[in-house]
Image (tube, rainbow, N blue to C red):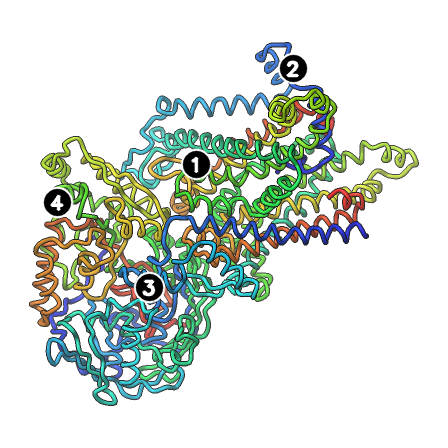
Amino acid sequence: MTDATNNNAAVRASAERAAVAALPRQESVATWLWNWLKHDKRAAISITYLAILVIAAILAPLFAPYDPNEQNLMDLLMPPSSAHWLGTDDLGRDTFSRLLYGSYNALYAAGLAVGIAVAIGVPVGVVIGFVGGWIDEAVSRVIDAILAFPPLVLAVAVTGALGIGLTNAMIAVGFSFAPVIARTMRAQTLVVKNAVYVEAATGFGASRAHLIVRHIVPNAIQPVIVEITLMLAVALLAEAGLSFLSLGVQPPESSWGGMLARAYHYVEVAPAQMLAPGFAILLTALAFNTLGESIRVLLDPTIKKKR
Amino acid sequence: MYAIGRMILRRLGQLVPVVLVATFVVFSLVFIMPGDPAIVLAGDYATQERIDEIRRIHGFDQPMLVQYLNWLWNVLHFDLGQSLYSNEDVAKLISDRLPHTILLVAYALMLGAVIGIPMGIYAATQQGSTIDKLITSFASLGVAIPNFWLGIILVTYFSLTWHLFPATGAVSFWDDPVEALRHATLPALALSTNVVAVLARQVRSALLEVLTSQHFRTLRAKGLGSSSILWKHGLRNVAATMLTITGLQVNRLFSSAVILEAVFAIPGVGALISYSALNKDIPVVQGIALVLVIYVILINLIVDVLNALLDPRVAAST
Amino acid sequence: MKNGTHLSGVSRRTILQGAAAVGGSLLVPATVRAQAQPVSGGTLRVAMPYNPAALDPLTGRNNPDFNTLYTIFDALIGFEPSTLELKPMLAKSWEFTDPTTLVLELQEGVEFHDGEPFNADAVVFHLTRCKDDPRSNVKSDVASIDTVEATGPMQVSIKLTRPDASLPAVLTDRPGLIVSPKSVKEAADGNVDRAPVGTGPFKFVEWRDNDLIKVERNTNYWADAPYLDAIDLRIINELNTAARTVTAGEADIALNLGAQQIAVARRSGDLEAEATPSLIYYTSFLNYARGPLADVKVRQAMNWALNREDINRVIMLELGQGHCSMFPSGFWANDPETENYYTHDIDRAKALLAEAGHSNGIEIETWAWPDQAAQQRQEVVSAQLAEAGIRLKVTPATPPQAMQNFLGDKQGDQLLSPTGGLPDPSLAYDRVFSASAYRNAGEIELDGYRPLMDASLSTFDQDARQKVMYDMQRFVLENALHLPQYLSAGMIVRRPEVNGFEFGLPQRPRFHKVWIAA
């Protein structure tokens, strides 16, 4: 649900451009990446941050000064100190260690939700866009119906149906995002379908499946890539929100949203406890968003002028 | 005008299938949810016999489709049923609670406009300046910040530390508008960041489009001041942007309101629907889903109509 | 015990007969701490976290409903809040003329809020409704009642199918809250869930669901007139929020709070924050009919592994009681000898586990509620059990889901849950451990349980009954029939101007004698 994708004209224009000038293929990926990041400082910073976060998430057991689940019932809600850089929580657990371990859940959650949204949204969007007719009409109504719901409300209901827990919550979020991707993909497919080279391929008697896989998806997917990156931020926020409502990550595992919920409970006693997880969510969402915007510019050079 | 009328009719026609599909989807979801409200209804010290009895009384023993059609039949007779847990009429429940949520969302939209639009205009006129960069960065933060976290921070300082606003709760707007707004200020502020950010950004680029247009240069050449040109010609762009964003943001705002209502203990529909969904209070979930879907669709319709009035070409394409 | 609020004297009085006290003397609150003279007038603004399911005593179901119920309804039999000693209320006196006949003499000159007279017919109608109304949630409470008969205009005789010493206490509970027969007869389908008419000190005005319940003074009250003009009971689901409304001056008193809110309020200093002993306790219901918990050694090992003092300190901030009895220290049915039957002893837990053939540890499938407070409890309990090699595999689920899975479908080994609050100890055991109890997932009774249960119901002498209760407590502990964790507390925050409030052991306050200082 980015702003530009709802602007039909912009979608069409960018898709047509993208079809002509896809990613550069001659140079090596590394060189290309280097050149891009050299010119786009924001993208460079975002990618660096996200890379560090991924490493931290994977190597949390190495970096974390404490076992994140080890309770120390004698040191509850301690302020930051040299022993506990970010203090301790209501059960005397080290906040910094929990934050590190929480980053894994945050990234896993965002990735899973968006992955599911893509896995459902892309095929559905392409097929209904390509086939058209009453199938398109019917599925589009269902998409409208789902989109008319506040996504988090839908996610809460689906989580309830599947059972409380991080994976189920993220399946729910992915399910509520899928229609967004399906709609974009459908719009793109409609544009690409009528493009000259697809018509040409049809003329050569290419099969439908071949058309979809070889021509339509690659050319229609680029705006979706931007959408996916931006959606990672929204999924991250949704995970935090659902964990705040105790529907996501379950104890004793840590999650940023869950840490916030607990910290809010003790806000009068230990207000500092709510800062770190909040900033972690903010920075990560910011990084995904900035990266998304940069990719948008990369894929559609005409935007650059406006920035 | 004819095109607009046709658009409205077409969209209203689409409303029925969308509402049917949406309520059916929700009904199925809640229905397949594990758990049995009868057990809770039977009390802390229930007996199996009593639980079975409650199932029969509420018709939980009937097939899902029958239960859905029963619900639909009653809705057609303007009966949304009663909450399983409190026996409150769902219609009354919604009419008591929806105003709190609407106030929150409307207030957030208004704050978003009041803060976001001037920011966008200012940034556009000062394009490339430090302030422009600041505003653009601020806009990025606004989209990324978790609303409920901002809400917690606002409560911590503005309520618990400085006692400027009430920490929590809500007052009916019709009973006491001033108090109602005072209660809604912090949550609305926390909720508005997204709108502020998106509006600031969109207004800025909408105005930049005007500023860089051939038309603008022509008017400039004729000796008109740039601020008056902006005022006259930029305004339409801004209005259109504002409308589109309102339409897009409304259900996202409802979404965030679910959590903010929990943080600020506002008795709105967001908190109610998540609670009811998890506890399988089907009549309440269905009632709210019905009203929310109609509400969101109507708002989008109104937005599109207004947009079409601003720019008749739109009517033909939507 | 560090919270400093001990129970006052234990009742040794027989419950066979109620004192024939009349009028005012029985209604003087037990602890009126303020020295000042009570003043009439004012609206008390109450914040409470739970919306009642119904205000018909028969169809409601949760303990916090009583915050409202006791304003509108009088019970047949009253009780002393801090001891549960029974006292006359709508029944001036009561007597078991034989083990299966209870005769009540009713208070004269009482009127319902709708102007109808309160008399034997009203009581007969009400108790019959408890037994027969399809929507009645209290059928199991009155299961021992065979027939109810008006044996005089102001006399009711209750015939029982079996001896039931718990019945007078039951009549302080929902079945004893007499609803106006006229209001039931006139309501559609007899549904008075949202239109309660009783004889209580306050009359129902309105109920905005999940928002506000209003009651106003019953000017025609049969006993001493209440001091307050009206009470606004505001429903605020989140505990911190509820407490803050008092801090912010938006409410006068907040009920059913958690330890955290008490600690915060005490820091601020200008509010009164009280934590009093409570019959609510936190435990795990165990399915001991099959699986790992069928072995008593495993159940005992779990009980030895818990450090209840730590749990009380972390979760209750020492406001509760960290022992393994189902009742607070000082309560008449609580045996002080066995309240610390299990202490923290990891070695013993491990040894028992090894004896049971689980020297490498054991996994226990566990259900728990999904809210923040429940998560915190479960985290502490899990960590303590893990030290003895008992690993909990926890599935969070909402109450309807968890109860259906654990109690209905017999999945999993234990369910972490608060319980308690029943007015009679026989019932407290019966509703958790009898084979017929819904909370008893295994639906079995261990050898020795039934004779104790029967004795507790057919012993009418209070001292003898206390002895039976002590034996029952020991039996439950020795057999480790559940995993008690800690006793909660009745926790409230109030403005100092609010006087005469008593939450009481069952957390069922009467606002009759509450007054607000000018």
Q: Are marks 2 and 4 on the same chain?
A: no
Q: Which structural element holds mark 4?
A: helix
Q: Which structural element holds mark 1?
A: helix
The disc label shown at residue C249, or none: none
Q: Are marks 4 and 3 on the same chain?
A: no
Hey, what amino acid is under mark 2?
Pro
Residue underneath mark 4: C296
Residue underneath mark 1: A256
- Sort mark 1 into few (<14), some (14-19) or many (20+) by Cα contacts within 10 Å: many
Image-quadrant location for residue C510: bottom left
Between the residue at mark 1 and the residue at mark 2, the CA separation in whole angstroms equals 38 Å
Hey, what amino acid is under mark 3?
Glu
Between the residue at mark 4 and the residue at mark 3, the CA separation in whole angstroms equals 35 Å
Between the residue at mark 4 and the residue at mark 1, the CA separation in whole angstroms equals 40 Å
- Which residue lies most toward the top here? A27
Residue at 24%, 84% in the rendered image: C106
C214 horizontally vs B251: left or right: left
Residue underneath mark 2: A24
Q: Which structural element holds mark 2?
A: loop
Report the front residue among A89 and A188: A188
Q: Report if residue C267 is visible in the image.
A: no
The disc label shown at residue B53, or none: 3
**Which quadrant holds the C terminus of chain C?**
bottom left
Hey, what amino acid is under mark 4?
Val
Relative image position of residue C464 (x, y in whole percent): 7, 67
Hey, what amino acid is under mark 1?
Trp
